[in-house]
Amino acid sequence: MSNLYLLPISVFLLFNFTFIGTYIAAVLQGHVVPTVPYISDAATYSPESCVFGQLISIGCVLLGITIYVRYRQIQEISYRHSDVRQAIGRYSVVAFWIGIGSCFGISIVGNFQETNVRIAHYVGAFLAFGFGTVYFWIQSYLSYYIQPYMGTMQKANLRLLLSVVCTIFFMIVSITGVISHILFQGTDPRKWYPSDGGWEYHVASSISEWIVATTFCFYVLTFTDEFRAMRFDHPPLIFLEIDTTRMYEPVINEAATS
């Protein structure tokens, strides 16, 4: 399997297209106000919620495959170089499962709208952003140790910077989001106006969410160059020899005795 570099590119394009396209559709339908709604607010009502859920589900599959390829890439490097194996230990395995947990959270966010199943939506958002940020920190750590054999120091520094950005704005989303909903006095949070209360916190929270989501996409995109240097082969197909005479032996013996 070649052209593995297309995986992170596909994830980057699909998620950004989904976020921006859903926002435009929601504004045109009059379901949200144009002034910086949450990403999930723009995907609350149909038909945009249906398209959002479908595209996010596809994106989660592609992202999961990308995380698996990255895991196999680091494992192969650790097998070939003992210094890398001693330095990273089981961090690669931990990163893989945390990344899959983030994918699961993204799928929950896409398929459980905030207005329908609020608790499930918030749990999915925590898994998506929280586990995703942890995954990026671990990948940044691993990038420095595999750098002599794969990647560059500049790429490792970039991932570290993106991890810092994710952490800062994830904390801002969490804090200002809670405060804004406490101060909100309107009737529909999807149509949040300055007179509804908590407007400044809402704007800070929603902008931070868009920054975190965009940073996530750019982080995945940084795997592109390293995926160019590898390929997957199809697993070998092994045919087992079956003794057909022994297969039918019980039937033959039974017929002979009868």
Image: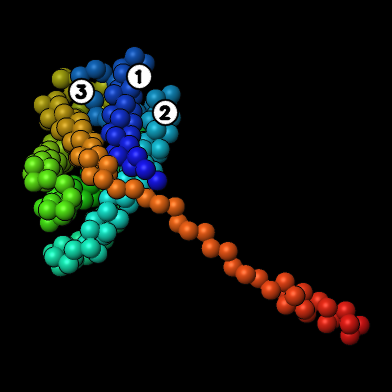
Is residue 141 something that shows in the picture? no
The x, y position of residue 228, in whole percent, is: 27, 42
Circle 3: element type? loop
Q: Quadrant of residue 43?
A: top left
Callout 1: 10 Å neighbours few (<14), some, many (20+)? some
Q: CA distance from mark 2 to mark 3?
A: 20 Å
Q: Which residue is mark 1?
A: 25
Q: Position of residue 53 (x, y in %)?
A: 40, 34
Closer to the camera, 239 or 252?
A: 239
Residue 31 position, x and y percent, is 34, 20
Q: Which residue is mark 3?
A: 36
Q: Residue at x 22, y 40 (%)?
A: 225
Name the kind of residue labelled 3 in the image.
Answer: Val
Question: Which label number is shown at residue 189?
Answer: none
Q: Quadrant of residue 212?
A: top left
Q: Residue tagged by mark 2?
A: 51
Measuring from the top left, give residue 77's x and y in whole percent: 22, 58
How many angstroms separate mark 3 from mark 1 (CA)?
A: 14 Å
Asked if the residue under mark 1 is in contact with the one under mark 2, i.e. CB atoms within 8 Å, the reply is: yes
Q: Residue furthest right?
A: 258
- For the point 34% across and 48% down, which residue is it? 231
Q: Residue at x 30, y 55 (%)?
A: 72
Is label 2 or label 3 in front? 2
> Is any part of residue 80 visible from this angle?
yes
